[in-house]
Image: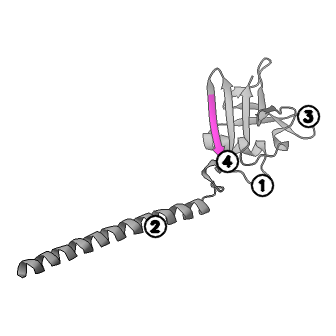
Amino acid sequence: MVLSVILHVERLKQSIKFRIWLGVVIAAALFSVWITLNLASENPFYKGSPSNFVAREATLIIDFGEGGKRLFAGSTIEGMNVYHALLASSRAGNFEIIMVPSGEGGGVVVDEIDGTRNTDTRVWQYYFNGEYKNALSPQAQPIQSGDKVVFKYE
């Protein structure tokens, strides 16, 4: 009789342990799903499904030629232009830029970046989303999230 009571108590303990274990597993799974859904809905880079992640930064590349490049990425604000992005990059990268008047409507052009100055044979040109834009002053070209600006010394 005592043996049967002990066996019955042992089965109850195993059953209780199993139920606790199962409850913990279910709770962990539900918590994981909840966290995933909440993080996805609050993430500013997330738009719907994983295939719809979008960049929320603009990119600025300075190409010194001969393999020397510097890359900058950062948030944009309304009213920002390529000139502002270049200034922000110079502060972040701790280098100097020199702009000179272009003579066209009060615009400016880049004369020097980080000690590399325009010469008779090579000058700073800029491309906006792959399109050559040097005729347009950097101050006149708006920039927003997802844009890519490349300043090339050519």
Residue extending furthest right? Answer: 105
Q: How far apart are marks 2 and 4 (CA)?
A: 34 Å
The amino acid beneath tag 3 is Gly
Q: Quadrant of residue 131?
A: top right
Q: What element carries label 1?
A: loop
Quadrant where the N terminus sits is: bottom left
Of mark 2 and mark 3, the one earlier in the sequence is 2
Q: Residue 103 carries which label?
A: 3
Q: Nearer the viewer, residue 115 or 109?
A: 109
Relative side of 79 to 76, left or right: right
Residue extending furthest top? Answer: 121
Q: Which of 108 and 143 is in front in this view?
A: 143
Residues at circles 1 and 2 in contact by the CB criterion of under 8 Å: no
Q: Distance between the residues labelled 1 and 2?
A: 40 Å
Q: Which of marks 2 and 4 is in front?
A: 2
Of mark 2 and mark 4, the one earlier in the sequence is 2
**Disc 2: which residue:** 30
**Disc 1: which residue:** 78
Q: How is the image coloured?
A: one colour
Q: Residues within 10 Å of mark 1 (few under 14, many from 20)?
A: few
Q: In which quarter of the image is residue 48?
A: bottom right
Of mark 1 and mark 3, the one earlier in the sequence is 1
Q: Give the range drawn in magenta.
A: 69-74
Q: Which of marks 1 and 2 is in front?
A: 2
Quadrant where the C terminus sits is: top right
Q: Is mark 3 on a helix, strand or loop?
A: loop
Dominant SS type (magenta): strand
Q: Residue 57 carries which label?
A: 4
Q: Which of marks 2 and 3 is in front?
A: 2
Q: Residues within 10 Å of mark 3 (few under 14, many from 20)?
A: few
Of mark 1 and mark 4, the one earlier in the sequence is 4
The amino acid beneath tag 2 is Leu
